[in-house]
Image (cartoon, rainbow, N blue to C red):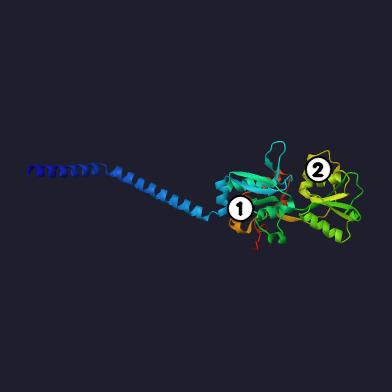
Amino acid sequence: MKKMRGLLALVLMSVLLATTVVACGSKGSDEEVAKASAATEATAESAASDTESDTETSELLKTIKERGYIVIGSSNDAPFSYQDVSTGELAGIDIEILEEICARLGIAEIEMKVIDFSNLLVELNNQNIDMVVDAMYVKDERLQIAAFTNKWYQEGETIVIPTDSEITSKEDLKDKSLGAQPGTTFYETAEGWLNEGRIGELVAYDNQATLMTAVNMGQVDAIITDGIVAGFTLSSDSALALKLLTPYAQEASGKIGSAVRFEDIAFVEEVNTVLDEMKSDGTLMGILKDYGLNEDYFVDIADGVTINIK
């Protein structure tokens, strides 16, 4: 009995001592408890935020992040989306815009597959690429095949002729041979001219390199191509005895965007969000200026909205 009473006394003493320790440190402990509680709440909120963010992330963006890189399709045309032969690195206007988009979306790397321009949307829908990034005009007929982002920028066509050519205007193209690249808006423009009797012959070339070579070698009298491409090519290759037809009024100007599969429309919205941020904060205009392009090529947020039909 005495042992039991002694044991009870020890237990009571221990409780009192414990209570005293807590009481003596009540101010510091309250602060520590508050800090611990706040930390726990912050962790919980962060976890909830991460879960919510993960839920809102599109399936394509999740796949790309898990893979570590996005796969794009391009016909490898400078100065839009191409591989620099001297460095092996991807370069171009579209690439720099995409790099900034990827940085803001948390995409680490970009891999490019070289595909003929006319097959880019086919390969996109065949699941061989995630996105088409190659100065592609957003057009009604293309919106039947794929979804498009908001417009990145705008530009139009030009006519390239030999430096010693007697062609001085569009009217001089009558009965002349004209080269163009199938799948482009410019080829369609040339087809219209052919049907109207405004040119004598239309010759197809698979890419910009062969197109430029053809007119430089005299295989055709002139070519119709992208104005930015032509200007860049002629300024960077002095061996080409070519010039731009001037004055010249563009007929096939258009706004450029990037194509994604219909089922990945949620990814399109993610791209649009950061693209519009880039327009607002001046980043996009800065990239255009780096390539010698002025405000005429810029498309603001309101004018850049793409209405996807599917």
> Within 10 angstroms of label 2, few (less than 14), some, or many (20 or more) residues?
some
Q: Quadrant of the N terminus?
A: top left
- Point out which mark residue 271 bears: 1
Mark count: 2
Amino acid type at image mark 1:
Val
Amino acid type at image mark 2:
Leu
| Residue 13 percent location from the top left of the image | 16, 42
Residue 262 occupies which quadrant of the picture?
bottom right
| Residue 95 percent location from the top left of the image | 67, 45
| Residue 169 percent location from the top left of the image | 88, 53
| Residue 84 percent location from the top left of the image | 71, 39
Position above or below: 203 against 85: below
Q: Residue at x 79, y 57 (%)?
A: 188
> Within 10 angstroms of label 1, few (less than 14), some, or many (20 or more) residues?
many
Q: Residue at x 22, y 43 (%)?
A: 18
Q: Quadrant of the C terminus?
A: bottom right
Secondary structure beneath dot 1 equals helix
Q: Nearer the N terminus, badge 1 or badge 2?
A: 2
Residue closest to the eye, 294 or 44: 44
Residue closest to the eye, 200 or 204: 204
- Point out which mark residue 234 bears: 2
Residue closest to the eye, 3 or 78: 3
Q: Residue at x 13, y 45 (%)?
A: 8
- Point out which mark residue 206 bears: none
Q: CA distance from mark 1 to mark 2?
A: 33 Å
Q: Is residue 87 left or right of residue 107?
A: right
